[in-house]
Image (cartoon, coloured by chain):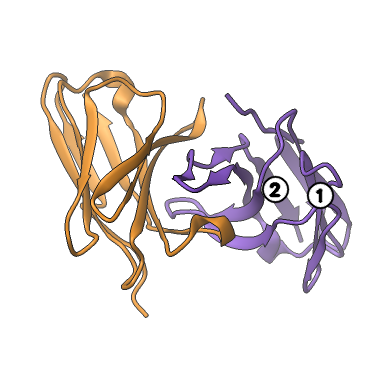
Amino acid sequence: KAGVTQTPRYLIKTRGQQVTLSCSPISGHRSVSWYQQTPGQGLQFLFEYFSETQRNKGNFPGRFSGRQFSNSRSEMNVSTLELGDSALYLCASSSTGYYGYTFGSGTRLTVV
Amino acid sequence: TQLLEQSPQFLSIQEGENLTVYCNSSSVFSSLQWYRQEPGEGPVLLVTVVTGGEVKKLKRLTFQFGDARKDSSLHITAAQPGDTGLYLCAGGIFSGGGADGLTFGKGTHLIIQP
């Protein structure tokens, strides 16, 4: 079956702009989580959606937001980009995260 | 806030040697997951352990969950160059409202030299 698809793979944005990243989970998975990965901080949890509802949120500023659609596809948005937002953004889907997640290949965001 | 300390951060060994990676926390986790990540790709799930004292084997890889469900280890026997990669442990606390997100260790960069 198809894996988790994230688009775009690479993105370059300017400080102050906003960006939207997309994630299509594995068919049948209703849980979608987002993570930020940087060399200094590693992988950090952003938020999790289940059946269009945000269930949990990590310790990130309000500039980071997301949503999930009825087909389980998810988007995350970052407004007023800062240089420190440069990172690999990973989406993960699961039927129940208890037994593990399937990650996408990520979107590499560079803010200049 | 849960923290997972993973050690060592970097490990470079010769093909055929054995190694162990450790993952420690002061928090109790419902589920402890190990992932492997290649450059430019997302993490790939290797194994999940959920019962204290549980041991799982995946070919030359042995995973152990501590009795108190606060720590875990990954042991690789007779390492091969194909084992090279970033190994990540991740703990989850699951309740009726889902997980509070996985807490990841910083990872172990493993290089196996031929």
Disc 2, SS: strand
Q: Chain of mark 1?
A: B
Of label 1 and label 2, which has the lower sequence position? Answer: 1
Instruction: Name the residue at 81% across, 49% down.
Output: B13
Chain identity for the colour purple used in the image:
B
Alpha-carbon neighbours of circle 2 within 10 Å: few (<14), some, or many (≥20)? many
Chain identity for the colour orange used in the image:
A
Instruction: Name the residue at 67% across, 42% down.
Output: B29
- Residue B69, position as x, y percentages in the image: 77, 44
Residue lying farthest front?
B96
Labelled disc at residue B13: 1
Foreground of the two, B24 or B13: B24
- Residue A32, position as x, y percentages in the image: 35, 53
Instruction: Name the residue at 12% across, 29% down.
Output: A18
Labelled disc at residue B110: 2
Question: Is residue A11 left or right of A98 when viewed as pictured?
Answer: left
* Placement of the C terminus of chain A among the 4 image quadrants: top left
Q: Chain of mark 2?
A: B
Instruction: Name the residue at 50% across, 56% down.
Output: A97
Query: Do labels 1 and 2 touch, CB within 8 Å?
Result: yes
Q: Quadrant of residue A48?
A: top left
Position of A66 relative to A31 (above/below): above
Question: Is residue B41 left or right of A20 when viewed as pictured?
Answer: right
